[in-house]
Amino acid sequence: MRAFRDWLRAEQPRMTAPAHVGLDDYAWYLRHVRLVPWDVAQVRLIGEREIARARTLLAIERHRNRALPDLIPAATAEEHEKRTRAAETWIRDFTTREKLLTIPAEIPPQYETDAFFIDRSAWGGHRHFWDEITYRDPLNNHIHASIPGHRFDGTLQRTNPRPIRRTFSDGTRSEGWAFYIEEMYLQAGLLADRPRTRELFYIAQLKRAARVHAELRMQQGTWGLEQAIDYLNAEVPLMETNLARYDLAIYLRRPAYGMNYTIGKAQMEQLLADRQRQLGDRFVLGAFHDEFLSKGSIPLSLIRWEMTGLDDEMRALGIVK
């Protein structure tokens, strides 16, 4: 790594090509590769709307909880692991009791977390964003990354009987599902007795929404990486520079990654609304989730077409006439 660092420093003066792709190419990629039915202006508007919505909900929740004590972060790896295991048990029990989706028998009895405990004492005890969130309560990250988010979702995809859907993974579909279920569980009542944890969910929501604006400004070329980092630090509570740099460098290298979360969630909500409108009183939330997950990780516009028969997005994308 040190040798690679030294090579980068030596070669950096020759690296003069722009890092951004420009919004014309970004729009082409959204339409023709990701099959997102919205243009850049619509993606930007949805992102800005979600920032305002998350900030509003967070402000209301903080007002509601103003007399409550703050959550105390876990101080040891053992305490964090205990909280994580309790969170997973609570998610599984709540999911089954409320019939939110089916947990098949082949699902492992527990999933690991990607928000493991790190002793930061050598760095003055400074925690990054996800440390701050998950050490207070691991529920948000465990829903998103483990069950019924990425790890659970991935287990189902690997057993899909259709070979293309078993191996293909669309980022907007994967991150859209994982982000959608965060708020779905919140609205379904998982956090009814955990008011301070609801604040953490809204902070995570704000973070994911802010990525859209930062990514578009970087890919447009109006912001460099440092400006985008400053924006994320200013916009998102608990955010800090190292985690902001980690995220935003990915979105600069991989255009349309940053929008995956918020735009995928918006597509999920559109699909649910369309299906509920079609079925009326026959709509069952758990059955909807099971059917959705059975479709694999293909673009959400294709899943919507398959589940509802609605072809307006397909016509807008030029897939059907």
Image: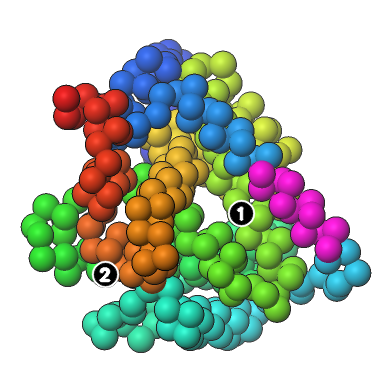
Q: Nearer the viewer, residue 245 or 301?
A: 301
- What's under tag 2, amino acid-wise? Thr
Mark carried by residue 130: none
Residue drawn at x 60%, y 59% is 130
Residue located farthest toward the front when viewing the structure as drawn: 281
Part of the protein shown in magenta: 53-64
Mark carried by residue 204: 1
Tell me, yes or no, whether the highlighted magenta stretch contains residue 274. Answer: no
Residue located farthest toward the right when viewing the structure as drawn: 67
Please say if 225 is above or below 55: above
Q: Is residue 202 left or right of residue 258?
A: right
Q: Residue 172 at what x, y percent from top left? A: 36, 44
Q: Residue 248 at what x, y percent from top left? A: 52, 37
Q: Nearer the viewer, residue 225 or 267?
A: 267
Q: Residue 65 at what x, y percent from top left? A: 83, 66
Q: Is residue 209 left or right of residue 155?
A: right
Please say if 307 is above or below 150: above
Q: Quarter holding the C terminus? A: top left
Mark carried by residue 155: 2
Tag 1 secondary structure: helix
N-terminal of the two: label 2 or label 1? 2
Residue drawn at x 16%, y 59% is 166
